[in-house]
Image (tube, rainbow, N blue to C red):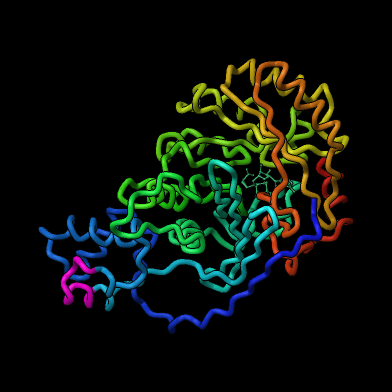
Amino acid sequence: MASDAPITQDVMTIPRKMPETDRVNLVGLTRAQMRDALLAAGTAEKQVKMRVNQVWQWIYQWGVRDFAEMTNLAKAYRAMLEENFVIEIPEVVSKLVSEDGTRKYLVRIAGGHEVEVVYIPEEDRGTLCVSSQVGCTLTCSFCHTGTQKLVRNLTAAEIVGQIMMARDDLEEWPVPGAPKDETRLLSNIVLMGMGEPLYNFDNVRDAMKIAMDPEGISLSRRRITLSTSGVVPEIARTAQEIGCLLAISFHATTDETRDVLVPINKRWNIEELLGALSAYPKASNSERITFEYVMLDGVNDSDEDAHRLIEHIKRHNIPAKINLIPFNEWPGSPYKRSSNNRIRAFANIIYQAGYASPIRKTRGDDIMAACGQLKSATERARKSRRQIEAEAGMRG
Ligand code: SAH
Ligand code: SF4
């Protein structure tokens, strides 16, 4: 619910960055890549392992952006780093803070593109919703990102940089010598911002590996959730190469409806998707797969749908929880949000069948910050309602 409480809007003017250089950004490199980069810049072979560790810790454990602060490195070595490298993350263009504490950032990346990043504080944790692409090649009919044409994949630096940016803003880098703070403001990552993370697999994997590295940001793989619309061939790789938790944008219980809502279903249908999920090697009762289900009035929200959903999950024996998402309407969107009563009745059927069925709280409504609706007002509605309705009708 939007309220009359004041919203702080602090639009920062950031001085223009230094002119483009050909210095290499150290952010986003894997340890192996950083090793190669330091070697190429003249680091001695027998020292390189130690140097990678030192530089890595400065960047990812202490959040240092200035080589001069890397005080355990000799001055000459720091000068060499300065000459060859930069430590660069996306720049914050604006920040909105909701009355409920949700923070929405607009960050600018190379080429002048902008993506949104949302921080959602909760009592016992804080979740950062991270983007993986500018726009999305897929065209889910209820999703606003799907109306934008893809501009490009984000680099690993731009993905892990979103996390570093949020830690900057939350002032959460540790202070040397201070006792370790166990309750982190930024404790969880969800890849639920703009884009389809499994269509940018390598960069997403490298960025998440960096975020998980114990000598750095050090987030447990169990605190990272990757959400996909169902890129079936990449699902097994996600378990093997990233090892994080999985969420699936399920949203419909028949192929007929899912073909319209999540058109990738025409490529890999519900049965193929469920097959890949039941084979997800990490799936267990402690690491259940999240089924995301957006509640669209009269489209996918009947009692029959709820029963069919359970039947699918049971038939494939998938350890699951079902996250019901009240649809976030956007100007021109061809659907309406299901009523609260309908959502509760749907949740109840699922719960009675023995599955957790939390209803996602809408957060940051007053600043349009809901995950999955990451879009700034100025760029909104490239397509008219008519166009989208026509296309949705065609697909149906
Ligand atoms: N491309 C990935 C991740 C980004 S979308 C995916 O599709 O899973 C993150 C979640 O938000 C998805 O479950 C998506 O279906 C959902 N979502 C998108 N638009 C939404 C809207 N307008 N209202 C509610 N949920 C939405
Ligand atoms: Fe892309 Fe996900 Fe939106 Fe579908 S729901 S258009 S996959 S961002």
Q: Main secondary structure of the magenta part?
A: helix
The part of the chain drawn in magenta is 71-80
Residue at the image point whose x is 72% and y is 39% from the top: 325
Image spot of residue 78 (x, y percent): 22, 73
Point 20% across, 61% down: residue: 51
Return the residue nearer the eye: 173 or 189: 173
Q: Quadrant of the C terminus?
A: top right
The stretch drawn in magenta includes residue 151? no
Query: Where on the picture, by quarter, is residue 175?
Result: bottom left
Q: Considering only vertical position in the picture, is 350 above or below 118? A: above
**Where in the figure is residue 281, as x and y percent of width and height?**
45, 26
Q: Position of residue 181 (x, y in %)?
A: 40, 48
Residue at 59% in and 72% down: 93
* Vertical order, 11 against 382 (above or below): below
Can residue 145 be seen here? The reply is no
Q: Is residue 293 above or below residue 209?
A: above
Task: Report the residue at 78% width, 44% height from top.
Answer: 327
Q: Can residue 268 be seen at all in this image of the molecule?
A: yes
Q: Nearer the viewer, residue 248 or 230?
A: 248
State the image coordinates of residue 238 (x, y, percent, origin top left). Answer: 47, 38
